Amino acid sequence: MSPTDPAAASLLRNRPFVLFWLARVGATVAMQVQVVAVGWQVYDLTNNPLDLGLIGLAQFLPALLLFLLTGHAADRYDRRTVLRICQTLEALAVAILAWATYSGWITREIILGVSLLIGAARAFEGPSLSSLLPTVVPPALFPRAVAGSASANQFATIAGPAVGGLIYAVNPVAAYVVSSALFFAASVIVALIPILGSAPKREPFSIGSLFAGFSYIWRHPIVLGAISLDLFAVLLGGATALMPIFARDILQTDAQGLGILRACPGAGALITSIALAFWPMRAHVGRIMFSCVALFGIATIVFALSRSMWLSMAALVVLGSVDLISVVIRGTLVQIETPDAMRGRVSAVNSLFIGTSNQLGEFRAGAMAAMIGTVPAVLVGGVGTLFVVAAWIRLFPQLYRISEMPVRMLK
């Protein structure tokens, strides 16, 4: 398919991408509703910020232990099948939370146990999802598809927390039921997605093939720099685990207010992703990415110091906007620079160091908040992000100096 074909003229005319977009929206809304419900419920049960961090740790540990297998699965098996299995397991896990809440025997330990199961499913889901996109759209459409896919994620990040907070305020059981139903719907849509070309070849299992993703990233400084920059920025700058504390104790709001706060980063990111889908970045992409990570740290500092709901919302909107730009640049660079036979394993390492850094960052924030207080914990993270930006400019100058997005065809 050439860039001038009608199907390539618009993402909305590309049926495989539309199905991919809908599936991602459904799964992400489901996840966000579950996250809001779990966060508020755990803090109501224990009033301990450390428990909020433990939820993040419970979702991080499976990805840490399984990441070698998750990438191999994405490269050996039909990625759609892997996604369907994972999303069905997530639907069942959230249904357990719904039943436990309805029956009145929900506890912190049950929530942590279910979070481990959800974390294991997401560990396999992440590499298959990210490596599926290049096989769904033609190469000429891929940079715009990355932005369009990000818009799906950000749209869901807006709708999910707002819906989750509103439903939880009415009935906690209903929030879990809605989340479970959306996970199942996403798995059905995934089955309908056609792919370009053949299914991944089953490379013989070996120790070398398991660690091939690490080897590839280590040999390519641009990929290594992009992944590690975002890893440390999110690890230090993320404060989402502490939002229930900011919402209830600092900003004096309720569960619906928490949902609004969680939706704000998605609002900024959604607006930015739509703009990038129509007007992709063409110059100084390296400097733009580093600048956006720095702004991410500054927005985190503003959020930590704010005592106004409106200022906190504004800081989170900016945070989401600049983070989205960084994500689009990094995602395009990593996927274009990686051959299809390696995308699953590279995406698995990327998921470990980027996707799960959110959960590990939540544990860091929760543990530090328990030791030094909520506001200082977020401040330390924001300032640390600025130091990471300065260090990475020196460590990866070739990444900083990238002028244009790569345009070679995906293979």
Image (spheres, rainbow, N blue to C red):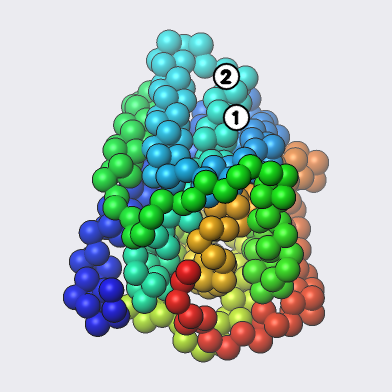
- Residue at image position (29%, 80%) is 3
Q: Secondary structure at mark 1?
A: helix
Residue at mark 2 to residue at mark 1: CA–CA distance = 10 Å
Above-or-below relation of 5 to 317: below
Q: Is residue 87 above or below residue 236?
A: above
How crowded is the residue under tag 1: few (<14 C-alpha within 10 Å), some, or many (20+)?
many
Left or right of 23, for residue 321: right
Rendered view: 210 above or below 13: above
The one nearer the camera, 359 or 249, is 359
User: Could you say whether the residue bearing mark 2 is in a helix, strand or loop?
Assistant: helix
Residue where numbered disc 1 is placed:
116
Q: Identify which amino acid the numbered label 1 is placed on.
A: Leu
Which label is found at residue 162? none
Q: Residue at x 45, y 29 (%)?
A: 89
The residue tagged 2 is 110
Crowding at dot 2, Cα within 10 Å, few <14 / some 14-19 / many 20+, comes out as some
Name the image quarter holding residue 135.
bottom left
Please state the horizontal and vertical placement of residue 322, each as a whole percent of the image.
Answer: 53, 70
Write the residue at 26% across / 45% down: 192
Residue 56, image x and y in percent?
A: 63, 39
Residue 23 visible, this angle: yes
On the image, the x and y values in percent for residue 112 come to 61, 26
Q: Is residue 23 left or right of residue 15?
A: right
- Towards the viewer: 344 or 173: 344
Q: Nearer the viewer, mark 2 or mark 1?
A: 1
Quadrant housing the N terminus: bottom left
Residue 348 vs residue 379, the one in the foreground? 348
Q: Amino acid at mark 2?
A: Ile
